[in-house]
Image (cartoon, grey):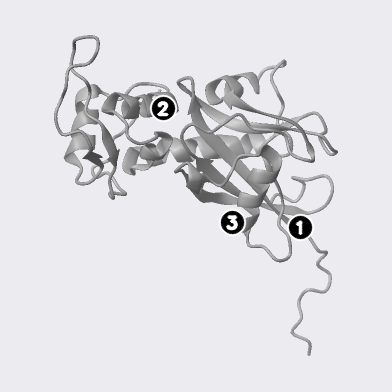
Amino acid sequence: MSTDDSRGHPPFAVTVDLAVFTIRDGAFSVLLVERGVEPYAGSWALPGGFVEPHEDAETAAWRELHEETGVERFGRHGGHLEQLRTYSAPDRDPRMRVVSVAHVAFAPDLPEPRAGSDAAGARWWAVDDLLVRSTGPDGPRLAFDHAEILRDAVERIRAKLEYTTLALEFVAEPFTLPELRRVYTAVWGSAPDLGNFRRKVLGTEDFVVPTQTHETPSEAGGRRALLYRRGAAASISPPMLRAIG
């Protein structure tokens, strides 16, 4: 008896989709590309594409990020990339059965993107503005199931900022505590309590490391904020909880 169970199962493709975030002008922002080809030509979508036979999903994610947007590998900026989840609804792509391994990526000070070979455009969108507009009649409709991926990615980042130090990946070094607090404000949509924020950041061992050990007068005559760099800590316990609702 044959042990090959592949008979009767049509082939399918594997893709990667990337929810890429940064903070621009104080707003939590996501990168979208305007599709230049069918299906969904003219619609906005998360950058991504098919995984080549010689690639794993992470390699494909880095390649697609650069090819479609011109954004270089995040290692040059600092930053973070991780798998979000797999999306495998049978009808998620009208071309054929396609399974997507979605990723979340974020880094500080990412540049203006440029559209790649199969994209008509690329731009940053404020997350809050995009989520509100996409539910209205005049908002941008995201291609495929990318609205669902985007919502999941936003919630992943908002949640991880509660119990990890990943907020540090949104700021360039050196940074001040007010700059770091603005990350939480942008991502969560509301500012964390100042006293609790300072206790968590300064009280968690190796969360941040001071690079300026004493205060010096600023040009305005006040006190210059201390500068910090990222520490080696990965988690916050107990977590720094956001205000829900």
Q: Is residue 70 left or right of residue 176?
A: right
- Pair 3/2: label in front: 3
- Pair 1/3: label in front: 3
Which residue was labeled with disc 2? 188
Q: Position of residue 61 (x, y in %)?
A: 62, 51
Q: Position of residue 189 (x, y in %)?
A: 42, 22
Which residue was labeled with disc 3? 58
Asked whether the residues under the numbered discs 2 and 1 touch, taking CB atoms below 8 Å apart as contact, a structural biologist would say no
Using the image as rendered, state which of residue 32 and residue 79 is in the foreground: 79
Using the image as rendered, state which of residue 31 and residue 3 is in the foreground: 31
Report how far apart the C-alphas of labels 2 and 1 lie in the structure. 35 Å
At a point 22% along the width and 16% down the height, the residue shown is 218
Report how far apart the C-alphas of labels 3 and 2 lie in the structure. 27 Å
Label 1 or label 3, whichever comes before in sequence order:
1
At a point 60% along the width and 48% down the height, the residue shown is 102
Task: Label 2: state its secondary structure.
Answer: helix
Task: Label 3: state its secondary structure.
Answer: helix
Which residue was labeled with disc 1? 13
Residue sitting farthest toward the top? 220
At a point 76% along the width and 77% down the height, the residue shown is 5
- Give the residue type at disc 3: Glu
